[in-house]
Image: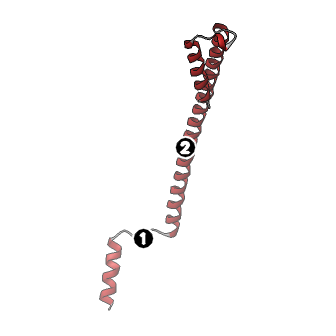
């Protein structure tokens, strides 16, 4: 029986000893800190992308507003006062313009 115990002890001494609870906790703390840092980096990247998209959205909404205003001005300045005086192409252009404005978000 003692021979078996000595052999087991000898095998344990040759291998890597299991980590202590303290070492296990330290390793987990480091992994947790690394994960938190990674999450913070991802949050920062997401915030930066959101800000960029919001800026672009505002920019394009302003462009749409200006184009709509210019189109309205063209209609008011170049089309007859009464729709009964419209040519067929002017009437078609007005219909297309009104249809295009309906799509606006």
Tags 1 and 2 touching, CB below 8 Å: no
Q: Crowding near pointer 2: few (<14 within 10 Å), some, many (20+)?
A: few
Question: Residue 73 in the image: x percent, y percent?
Answer: 66, 12
Question: Residue 80 in the image: x percent, y percent?
Answer: 66, 8
Residue in the foreground of this view, choosing between 57 and 94: 94
User: How many numbered discs?
Assistant: 2
Residue drawn at (58%, 35%) of the image: 48
Report which residue position mark 1 lands on.
18
Q: Quadrant of the N terminus?
A: bottom left
Q: In the picture, residue 78 is in which quadrant? A: top right
Indicate whether 41 appears above or below 6: above
Q: How is the image coloured?
A: secondary structure
- 26 vs 1, left or right, is right
Q: Quadrant of the C terminus?
A: top right
- In the picture as drawn, the residue positioned furthest to the bottom comes out as 1
Q: Crowding near pointer 1: few (<14 within 10 Å), some, many (20+)?
A: few
- Which numbered disc flags the more N-terminal residue, 1 or 2? 1
Report which residue position mark 2 lands on.
41
Question: Residue 20 in the image: x percent, y percent?
Answer: 48, 69
Residue drawn at (30%, 82%) of the image: 7
- In the picture as drawn, the residue positioned furthest to the right comes out as 81
């Amino acid at each position: 029986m003692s021979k078996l115990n000595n052999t087991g002890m000898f095998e344990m001494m040759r291998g890597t000893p299991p980590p202590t609870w303290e070492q296990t906790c330290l390793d987990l703390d480091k992994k947790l800190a690394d994960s938190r840092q990674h999450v913070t980096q991802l949050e920062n990247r997401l915030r930066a992308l959101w800000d960029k998209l919001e800026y672009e959205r505002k920019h394009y909404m302003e462009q749409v507003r200006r184009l709509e205003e210019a189109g309205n001005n063209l209609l008011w300045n170049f089309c007859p006062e009464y729709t009964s005086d419209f040519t067929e192409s002017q009437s078609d252009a007005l219909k297309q313009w009104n249809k295009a404005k309906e799509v606006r978000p």
